[in-house]
Amino acid sequence: MLAPGRSECRFIKLVIYFHAAVIGTGKLLGLDNRHALAFPFGVIMIPLSLLLFPNPSAFSELGRSWVYFDYTYCVGMPLLLFSLAAGNIHVLSDVG
């Protein structure tokens, strides 16, 4: 079995972002059935992705120019949020 490469990690990240966008928009609009938003989001996402990245070389150029952005939001932000959540759990356990 091969170790996951960059394309598999990008796919997983895209699925998580897509799910979060559908759930967040559903909550923002106060919809009971958030699954109805998945198809319209997909219809919007496919042409938008082709417009932003017409070929694979344009996508790979983005990866080289956003190295610091990736490290900040893929490593730094999750660590910060995890540490804040761990602190809140400790504070909430003292209250009860």
Image (cartoon, rainbow, N blue to C red):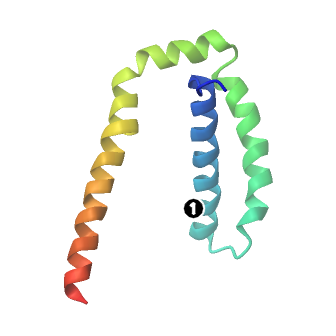
Instruction: Tell me which residue sits at (27%, 49%) in the image.
Output: 80
The picture places residue 33, in percent across and down from the top left corner, at: 74, 72
Q: Label 1's element?
A: helix
In the rendering, at what x and y percent does residue 92 appear? 26, 79
Q: Please identify the residue farthest to the bottom as the structure is shown.
A: 96
Q: Quadrant of the C terminus?
A: bottom left
Q: Which residue is pictured at 60% across the width and 13% down the height? A: 58
Count of numbered marks: 1
Residue drawn where x is 69% and y is 24% of the image: 51
**Please, is residue 68 above or below residue 24 in the view?**
above
Closer to us: 22 or 4: 4
Quarter of the rendering containing residue 7: top right
Q: Position of residue 42 (x, y in %)?
A: 76, 45
Image-based side of 36 in relation to 5, left or right: right
Image-based side of 17 in relation to 42, left or right: left
According to the picture, the residue beneath numbered tag 1 turns out to be 24
Q: Residue at the spot x=74%, y=42% of the render?
A: 44
**26 with respect to 83 (left or right):** right
Camera-nearest residue between 75 and 30? 75
Choose between 90 and 84: the one closer to the eye.
Answer: 90
The amino acid on which the numbered mark 1 sits, given as a three-letter code, is Gly
Give the image location of residue 21, x and y in percent: 60, 53
